[in-house]
Amino acid sequence: MESIGVLMTCPPPDAYLVEQLEKRFTLYKFHSIPDKAHFLNSNKASIRAVVGSASAGADAQLIHQLPNLEIVSSFSVGLDKIDLAKCKERGIRVTYTPDVLTDDVADLAIGLMLAVLRRLCQSDRYVRSGQWKKGDFKLTTKFTGKSVGIIGLGRIGLAIAKRAEAFRCPISYYTRTEKSDGVLINIGRGPHVDEPELVSALVEGRLGGAGLDVFQDEPIVPEELFGLENVVLLPHVGSGTMETRKEMADLVIGNLEAHFLNRPLLTPVL
Amino acid sequence: MDCNGYRQENHDQNLFPKPKVLVLEPPPVFIYHEEKLSQKFHFLKAWDSPLPLEQFLTTHAHSVQAILSHGSCPVTTNTIRLLPSLGLIVTTSAGLDQIDLQECRRRGVSVAYAGNLFSADVADIAVGLLIDALRKISAGNRYVTQGLWANNGDFSLGSKLGGRKVGIVGLGSIGLEVGKRLEPFGCNILYCSRNKKSSVSYPYYSNVCELAANCEVLMICCELNDQTRHVINKEVLLALGKKGLIINVGRGAIIDEQEMVRCLMQGEIAGAGLDVFENEPHVPSELISLDNVVLSPHRAVHTEETLMALVDLVIGNLEAFFSNKPLLSPVLLDE
């Protein structure tokens, strides 16, 4: 399979993934190629697979430029960076990494809720800066028993609900609520939320707090949020554990191998 | 002890003065809710007086029947002996290590405490500290707010919580709440406690060292007493191992702090989440620079909701005492 060209369109997300891809295929790291147009012109015929992630996948333009593309294997469960309609039209297979990261993302969502309501990051800073010697940290808000609303009741949403129930949180599912003491947790994708609107709601105190792992234009995070004590910001680490990233990489590799060996795909979308 | 002179129903101060309650140092509940408490009781504020404590007690508090105390305010043998009319100590804490219980037992002084009021909040913090330590929430937040994500690229990976064996040290009210919360995260719960609990199915270990050897996370949820002081020592920490984490929401002195710091610095354990320390508010300076440690200033119970409930409990206990009714949350002193 060494002659099969695989184009990694995202910045390399994981050393183990890159290593395993390079062992089996000819891997091109698109992100670091300066003249992408020239590169594609010279190499398009040999590229039969694309590997993407949450940051970059395969849009219509790219798909159009790869006449021999057979499969897109995404190092993510989110498919928002892949033009699925175009793939379906061209008969291109698409795979992703469901289930293996569900627990980690749900764990982080609960972690963010606790961190925001109980001000874990701020109180950690309070101790490190020596302020505790001058006085007690202030009161925070109890988490147990708070109502949790989940937008998107897929695998991850259900896993969050299961965990929140152990904290005696009543669970409900609704699309939008404007409550000044409400807290927004986003572990999905940045574009789910109108970011400028979210920033002004937080800055103006119209929203009780936020825990955000994803943003509209990563890694750019609106700096107005940095100083807000009711906001916790994370650098898209939802699935960021050593254990889970390895499982995701194994799925990407496993899917590619299955495809090129004419076996059934492990986790196909299309 | 004669309480017949006090009638709580009638707040006319001219005929029936408010009962006197001695306060040695103000508990947090006092700082936030003194007004509400002062509507019902007259507080003798020892800390406010220029007199040394002994003198204050003999001069102003000699006939006092009740003390309002808190977790880090000692009520010593000496204090109790200087108050011949003392009948009740109300503490706003769940912990009792700061009160000379033996002297109370000897003198027939009742003690009321916070009972299980705090258990949910403490369990929430314990789980929060664990997820923070494993998934680097505070460290990740620092990474973003210091502008490093945009410039330095991806943050380092954390570790998965699911599938981990979590050993709970002390399966009382707090320990049980921690276990309940961690189960849906896919954790395997083990425990060590004074006695085996027949009502739970978690595997039981009779000593902490064996528990540590069989798990990857230790959650310290027990009280501080003679048996638990420094029970988490070098042997236990080494048994926990290089991938192990320790979370302490009990009391600082349950862990040999110096030894824990050494183990963290040398990588003998992987990390820690700590709400309590041996010498609060002082935290070992070595911990301040560690990224694999989450620090919290002993505020596991400091939520607005719980403090409100605590005020009501304190008032309820004091009112019950002064009207000869059963206390709402008594400590069983003949254990």
Image (tube, coloured by chain):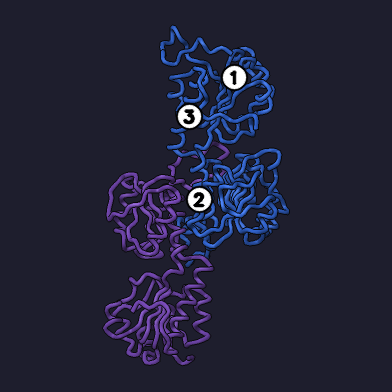
Chain colours: A purple, B blue
Please state if A176 lies on the left or on the right of B56 as rendered. Answer: left
- Give the labeled residue for mark 2: B180
Residue A263 image point, x, y percent: 43, 87
- Give the labeled residue for mark 1: B87
The correct choice, above or below, for B12 with respect to B223 in the image is: above
Q: Earlier in the sequence, mark 1 or mark 2?
A: 1
The residue drawn where x is 31% and y is 59% is: A193
Report the disc number at residue A23: none
- Give the labeled residue for mark 3: B313
The residue drawn where x is 33% and y is 75% is: A82
User: Badge 1: how crowded within 10 Å, few (<14), some, or many (20+)?
Assistant: many
* Distance in Å between CA atoms under marks 2 and 3: 25 Å
Residue B306 image point, x, y percent: 46, 37
Task: Please tell me which residue lies in front, B329 or A41.
Answer: B329
* Distance in Å between CA atoms under marks 1 and 2: 38 Å
The amino acid on which the numbered mark 2 sits, given as a three-letter code, is Lys
Q: Earlier in the sequence, mark 2 or mark 3?
A: 2
User: Badge 3: how crowded within 10 Å, few (<14), some, or many (20+)?
Assistant: many
Please state if A21 lies on the left or on the right of B209 as rendered. Answer: left
Residue B229 image point, x, y percent: 69, 42
